[in-house]
């Protein structure tokens, strides 16, 4: 979907149409941009940007609070349209999904024609526009979907894939974030053609296991299937504070309560995890994570809290003001059938 949250807001409130709309937190607090309209993007505003920075870039921007119930309702309608064509739908978020239409309910031989029909149906049902990428694998389809936004449709045939990827700016590669992009630029990788000059061994040396991924995608190799049932990989909670926090005692108390909330939530869904992650965002927006894995599954509050306290020692919390804290459990005990496995906890006395 194109600027999904902002587009829903502009659709539902005609006075916002054609104006720079920012959906997310308040610029007077510690808010963050969830998304923004294309009118706002012209000023350099983007998702995950502090709202205070967004208002400096565009003083006349209109800030709107998120309405997730409205977005979920639209997302539900869009998914229903997808399922009219195929059962192989893998949602990535409320506004994005992979569809495998090799075999489809309408027996349409052209994936491009299906994409065109789906875009038309979405507009008829929701009055919102979507962009589609059509290709023979997930990576290329994802990249293609971002090429001609908004309201675009881009086809990458197998014959054109190699030349397309060689000409592509490295920042357009799905899976290459800002930090990786900066590192690639520093070593002379600015396009797909530059990336293609590197051997797999050298890419692994430079980027770790992600190097194997980069080596394959620049050659158009991606054999991942579209998986309709995605396994939940983590369970977490975080909070952005209205004021910067520097009291270590207050932080200990907050994380103690957050660990309790996580433990209760995990037990409600009969889940447990082996990897515990602490997330910290400092006053200057630097964000770090500290993780550790234990030998068994846990959803016990005390055990989660003890690990988090230990991870906290490996941060600068208490020395630097903090604006966000979060705890996540991952490496969960969920099997391929999307069923929580029976827990076997080794209790310590």
Image: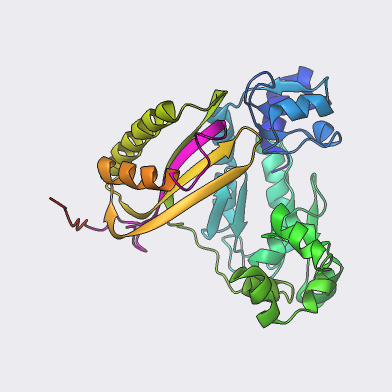
The image shows residue 24, relative to residue 199, as above or below, that is above
Q: Which stretch is magenta? A: 313-341
Q: Is residue 221 visible?
A: no
The image shows residue 108, relative to residue 321, as above or below, that is below
- What residue appears at the point 53 percent right and 41 percent down from the top-left corner? 316
Residue 41 picture quarter = top right
Which is more toward the observer, 182 or 117? 182
Position of residue 49 measured from the top left corner of the image (x, y, whole percent): 70, 36
Position of residue 109 measured from the top left corner of the image (x, y, whole percent): 68, 68
> Left of 24 or right of it: where is 332?
left
> Left of 313 or right of it: where is 204?
right
Position of residue 238 measured from the top left corner of the image (x, y, whole percent): 48, 36
- What residue appears at the point 33 percent right and 38 percent down from the top-left corner? 265
Which is more toward the observer, 241 or 106? 241
Query: Farthest residue in the left direction?
Result: 349
Query: Farthest residue in the front direction?
Result: 319
Quadrant position of the N terminus in the picture: top right
Number of numbered discs on residues: 0
Residue 236 picture quarter = top left
The image shows residue 235, relative to residue 103, as above or below, that is above
Which is more toward the observer, 258 or 129? 258
> Left of 205 or right of it: where is 257?
left
Which is more toward the observer, 323 or 113? 323
Q: Is residue 330 visible?
A: yes
Q: Is residue 318 magenta?
A: yes
Position of residue 248 measured from the top left corner of the image (x, y, whole percent): 44, 30
Q: Is residue 177 magenta?
A: no
């Amino acid at each position: 979907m194109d600027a999904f949250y902002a587009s829903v807001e502009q659709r539902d409130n005609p006075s916002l149409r054609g104006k720079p709309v920012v959906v997310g937190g308040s610029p007077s607090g510690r808010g963050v941009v969830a998304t923004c309209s294309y009118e706002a993007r012209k000023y350099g505003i983007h998702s995950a940007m502090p709202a205070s920075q967004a208002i400096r870039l565009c003083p006349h921007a209109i800030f709107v609070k998120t309405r997730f119930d409205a977005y979920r309702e639209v997302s539900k309608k869009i998914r229903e349209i997808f399922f009219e064509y195929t059962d192989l739908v893998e949602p990535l978020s409320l506004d994005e999904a992979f569809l495998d239409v090799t075999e489809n309910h309408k027996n349409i031989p052209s994936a491009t024609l299906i994409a065109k029909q789906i875009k038309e149906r979405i507009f008829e049902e929701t009055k919102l526009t979507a962009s589609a990428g059509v290709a023979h694998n997930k990576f290329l389809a994802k990249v293609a979907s971002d090429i001609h936004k908004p309201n675009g449709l881009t086809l990458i045939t197998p014959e054109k894939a190699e030349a397309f990827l060689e000409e592509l700016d490295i920042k357009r590669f799905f899976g290459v974030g800002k930090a990786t992009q900066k590192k690639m630029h520093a070593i002379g990788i600015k396009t797909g053609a530059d990336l293609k000059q590197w051997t797999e061994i050298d890419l692994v040396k430079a980027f770790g296991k992600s190097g194997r991924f980069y080596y394959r995608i620049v050659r158009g190799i991606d054999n991942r299937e579209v998986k309709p049932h995605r396994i939940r990989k983590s369970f977490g909670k975080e909070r952005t504070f209205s004021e910067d926090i520097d009291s270590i005692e207050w932080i200990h108390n907050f994380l103690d309560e957050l660990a309790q909330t996580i433990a209760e939530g995990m037990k409600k869904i009969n889940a447990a995890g082996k990897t515990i992650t602490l997330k910290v965002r400092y006053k200057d927006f630097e964000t770090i994570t500290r993780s550790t894995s234990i030998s068994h599954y846990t959803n016990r509050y005390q055990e989660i809290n003890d690990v988090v306290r230990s991870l906290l020692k490996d941060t600068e919390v208490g020395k630097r003001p903090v604006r966000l804290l979060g705890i996540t459990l991952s490496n969960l005990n969920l099997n391929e059938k999307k069923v929580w496995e029976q827990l076997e906890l080794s209790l310590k006395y």
